[in-house]
Amino acid sequence: MARSSTNWQNLVTVVSVLILVGTEVFGVALAGGWALAGLFELGDAVAYALMGLFSLLSTYVVYLLWRRAVHIEPIRGR
């Protein structure tokens, strides 16, 4: 059974996209939680809770992006 090799160019591409998009998605999640709590005057505790909730949602979005990116740009040779 032959061991498949790593396609480094695809790996670098996928990781680069995830860093770029992930940073933006987490930034939007944190800013959105802070802005909603400030807009409705909900207090610091609710702001942190919203930021945490939105960060979990953004983690899921980045995970979905990882799955799609690896499907399009396979990391392992076939």
Image (tube, grey):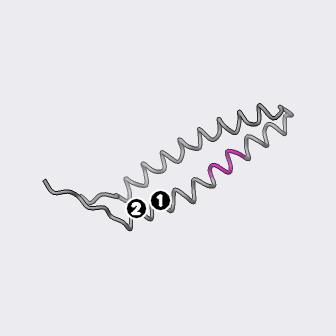
Q: Is residue 50 magenta?
A: no
- Residue 15 x %, y %: 47, 59
Report if the CB atoms under discs 2 and 1 are less than 8 Å apart. yes
Q: Is residue 26 magenta?
A: yes
The magenta region covers 25-30
Residue 15 marker? 1
Residue at screen point 26% across, 61% down: 5
Give the residue at mark 2: 11
Between the C-alphas of marks 2 and 1, the distance is: 6 Å
Please identify the quarter of the rendering in which residue 45 is found. top right
Q: Main secondary structure of the magenta part?
A: helix
- Residue 19 x %, y %: 55, 58
Residue at screen point 73% across, 44% down: 32
- Residue 34 x %, y %: 77, 42
Q: Secondary structure at mark 1?
A: helix
Residue at screen point 40% across, 61% down: 11
